[in-house]
Amino acid sequence: MSADITRVVDAVWRMESAKLIAALTRVTGDVGHAEELAQDALVAALERWPETGVPAKPGAWLMATAKYRAIDAFRRSERLERKTALLGRELAEAEEPDWAAALDEVVEDDLLRLVFISCHPVLSREARVALTLRLLGGLTTEEIARAFLVAEPTVAQRIVRAKRTLTAARVPFEVPTGPDFTARLGSVLEVVYLIFNEGYSATAGEDWVRPALCQEALRLGRILAELTPGEAEVHGLVALMEIQASRLRARVTPSGEPVLLPDQDRGRWDHVLIRRGLAALDRAEQLGRALGPYGLQASIAACHARAGSVEDTDWARIAALYEALAEVSPSPVIELNRAVAVSRAYGPQAGLELVDALLDVPALRGYHLLPSARGDLLAQLGRSDEARAEFERAASLTRNERERALLLDRAAACGPSRELGT
């Protein structure tokens, strides 16, 4: 098989697999079985396309092949009798059950159902992330494992257990309504943002950023925004990711070293993504409801995007937005970010007082950005020895090698320790 055909098949699968699995899940009622049928269609493409060439509409070819596989599976199983009985006398008397027609219902509805089932709260957070990337992103187990620096068998087990859990819990393939919709949508948004954050600031490994994960989260967010146009928080999340992603190229040097916000070349920010993000934020605001956590974070990101430099940034507004964010989504991490904004708006001493109030918060023990922020404020106040100690502590806590090197460089920049007599 030529490398070109393989690349084409991979690209088509990445784009079309979610639609295939969604349509098949609706009919089979089993996301695991649906994925198997979709994989069968992929195998058929790998076998046939090198001989026949890539079809004019490869996605339609895969869907048709998956339909035939599904129909054959129904015919061979006892499910056909059970489903026929449930569907009623008219279908029982039909010469052929119209499974093909059933597979041709609205694709958008199926995709939305697949989003909600992949992110169902009955699954652990890690399982939701893995299953979402597998079913909606079309990523292989190996790709997911590599992205999150987890052993491939571990990811495979998470996916298998997740599908079994959904089947055992008899989770319906439907979009929830009323209060259930709001609760489940929060789980969906959390999963998408977790994927994005791991790409934007990798928690471990040798890379500071993993742009492919950010792109995947953005793709999922954009799909979700199209499927739920009246949900302000969905547009808020998309706005946040678009604006944050605009800085990816400027966040690292050509050799991969981190570049912090004050040192970034804003000319390298992607202004197409910024415009898209600001447009998404505008859509969220136009829906007429108070912004939620993602919309408020997008507003903060917009302040940075609109500023020509760190000095020109409206830090007082950012501090106020963080205060509003803390009211709707209380979190010590948000309070830490607010402290940094306050330090920019009103001076490092004001920020340090807020940071020091967080030192005994249990949730921030072991959180490397707390000593990192404190070290930065101490350095601005000229307390070099204390700043060095904080940067060294932060370096000992992070699991990202690039970030550790950056923090140790910042510690060294504070000068030699007078306590050591050097």
Image (spheres, helix red, strand yellow):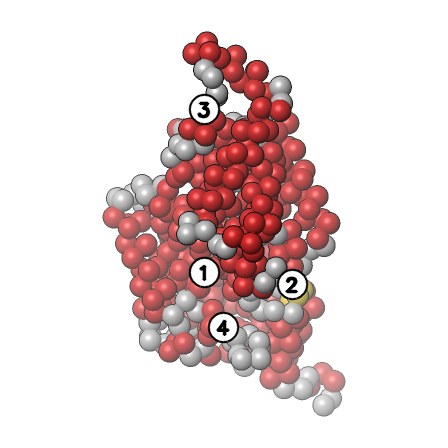
The image's mark for residue 204 is 2
Amino acid type, residue under disc 1 in the picture: Arg
Q: Secondary structure at mark 3?
A: loop
Amino acid type, residue under disc 2 in the picture: Ala
Residue 258 in the image: state x and y as whole percent: 55, 74
Mark whose residue sits in front, 3 or 1: 3
Q: Are marks 3 and 1 in contact (CB under 8 Å)?
A: no
Which quarter of the rendered picture does the C terminus lie within?
A: bottom right
Spatial separation of the CA atoms under disc 4 and disc 3: 54 Å
Amino acid type, residue under disc 3 in the picture: Asp
Q: Earlier in the sequence, mark 3 or mark 1?
A: 3
Which residue corresponds to mark 4?
A: 251
Which residue corresponds to mark 3?
A: 98
Work out whether residue 323 or residue 420 is closer to the camera in this orientation and state it.
323
Q: Residue furthest front?
A: 51
The image's mark for residue 338 is 1
Query: From the viewer's perspective, is residue 238 above or below residue 261?
Result: above
The image's mark for residue 187 is none
Spatial separation of the CA atoms under disc 3 and disc 1: 58 Å
Amino acid type, residue under disc 4 in the picture: Arg
Residue 125 in the image: state x and y as whole percent: 60, 44
Which quarter of the rendered picture does the N terminus lie within?
A: bottom right
Spatial separation of the CA atoms under disc 1 and disc 2: 25 Å
Work out whether residue 155 or residue 108 is closer to the camera in this orientation and state it.
108
Q: Earlier in the sequence, mark 4 or mark 3?
A: 3
